[in-house]
Image (cartoon, grey):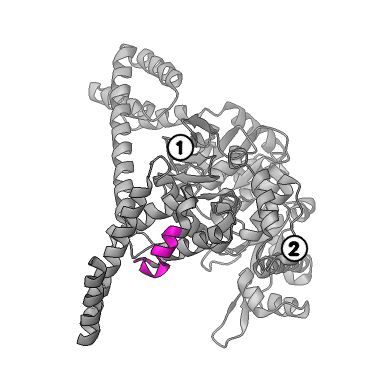
Amino acid sequence: MPLPEAFLQELKMRSDIVDVVSSYVSLRRSGRNMVGLCPFHHEKTPSFNVYAENGSFYCFGCGVGGDVITFIRRIENLDYMEAVRFLAQRAGLQVPEDHVDDGMAKLRARILEINREAARFYHSVLMSEQGAAGLSYLRGRGLTQATIRHFGLGYSPPSRFALVDFLAKKGYQEAEMIQANVAFKGRSGRALDRFFGRVMYPIIDLRGNVIAFGGRVLTDAKPKYLNTSDTLVFRKSDALFALNFAKNQGGQQLILAEGYMDVISLHQAGFTNAVATLGTALTMEQARLMSRYAKEVVICYDADEAGQKATARAIPMFREAGLLVKVLNIVGGKDPDEYIRSYGEQGPARFKQLLDACGNDLEYRLAKIRRNCNMESADGRVAYLTGAAELLATLDNRMEQEVYAGRLAEEIGIDRSAIMMQVDKNSKKRQKQQQQKQFRTFQQQTAGIGDDINPEKVKHLRAASAEEALLAYVVKYPDHAKEIYTRLPPEKFSTSFNRRVYQVIMGKIMDGKDYSLTDISGDFSVDEIGAIARIFAKYHDVSATWQDAQEYIEVIEQEHAKLRLEDAASVPTQSIEAYLAELKAKKK
């Protein structure tokens, strides 16, 4: 059953979208709207808009939009009811659970239970004779028993049914195990353990739930590391290993290492602010997440080519998230775990020296450009200054540009104004490219190209455009809703998605209920709500009259008539004649 109307209205009233979004995104006023850098994609120029008057948000850069519930669903990776509970707890409200069909929430709860039981099972195996190989590996990597217990490390036995049989005895169904991704269906149809013969690293979220696992094989088998795939409770792009511990370390700095063992070794050495991504490259969501718990991040990746590429990719993301960035290079190309262990008792102190001495990301990138240029030649120095000017042009802070231009001028022996002239030239070029890209994206969205939510739009562009304009008009001016609905039944819409939105919104209005995005968000997926938010955002500043609305209706009717004529080839002649007579009568 749906949530009671009174509860939704109270939740909406206490969950002001500007207040909620501001806890994740730095917003500034722009006319009647609030704007900021989008938390859902990488951008330099703010294209993320929050519309306080109708409780919606929309990003013109990536097309993500919705209401306050949709925002929480996306940024916290929650389903609809979990997002409602999240906001209700924030607002001090009690969710009327008796009225809620929470089948999905119950499945998520079962998956979390399965993960917790699996973590306990793997740890118990590690501490038994079966886990001797795994324990030997971890002890060989210098981990103490306290560290192993602190991180809940484990071992998955070689048997393909060990965990499946264990969970079955606990009362869990094979289908639930597969949903949790701790098992998969074999050729025989029976569930098999996903992880076997691996050292297991539980991945724990900020609420203390085991949401996934990473497993390292102890042989030469591939893949070396196997991670849980995305599930109802886990999404790789949103989570970080050990952030549940690092967020409580009390400082304003996080260390981003490359893998599980690097992080665990750093924690054991006293650097409890270390975290890692989960077998994938850093995402904007993870950068934003880190910015909620720190002001500065130190990138501590391997010194090999892959590590350097990953560092170069991560730097702009952290800067966009508002973090100060430093880059730590370990002498000899060692990783943090290897470096600390190689110095024995002096390892932590040595690493602390490296940490304190590491430069910021700009110094790191300038040094990298310099290494690739022959500074003994005039051409090499020009190449260095050209690359440096291109780098400085990516900075948003004018003072930062000026300071480093001054350093470059002293280093090479030229006038600072010459460097700044080139920086400004590059900045204008970049800005023009970004504007052109945004314009092309807007054109494609307007034309319906690549619209997965309303794929019929590209074929019925004129009808779909009129449908969208009418939807925006109805929401703005509901007084004409009954008259519009009488003249224009849903069947006359040419695109099925717009037809469904029209039916839901009109149904709310006819019943005398509210019809904002929050009131209908339970009827649509997050992507569908985003598409509706795009319609509202597109027409937000458009002043439409009743005459405009009538013109939209006429277009929709004309396009519907065309569709009927196009289908006439498969209709008997008598039916066509009757339809044409009907049209003739209407004109009279």
**x then y, percent, for residue 399:** 45, 18
Q: Secondary structure beneath disc 2?
A: helix
Q: In this view, does 401 lie above or below 333?
A: above
Q: Nearer the viewer, residue 410 or 549?
A: 549
Q: Do the residues labelled 2 and 1 touch (CB within 8 Å)?
A: no
**Is 92 included in the stretch rendered in magenta?**
no
Numbered tag placed on residue 316 in the rendering: 1
Question: Along the horizontal axis of the image, is 460 left or right of 396?
Answer: left
Dominant secondary structure (helix, strand or loop) of the stretch shown in magenta: helix
Residue at 58% x, 26% y: name it.
Answer: 357
Amino acid type of disc 2? Glu
| x and y, in percent, of residue 1 in the image | 67, 68
Under mark 1, the amino acid is Pro
Neighbours of disc 1 within 10 Å: few (<14), some (14-19), many (20+): many
- Can you tell which quarter of the image residue 552 is in? bottom left
Q: Where is residue 206 in the image (x, y as percent from the top left)?
A: 69, 50
Q: Give the range drawn in magenta.
A: 483-495
Residue holding disc 2: 97
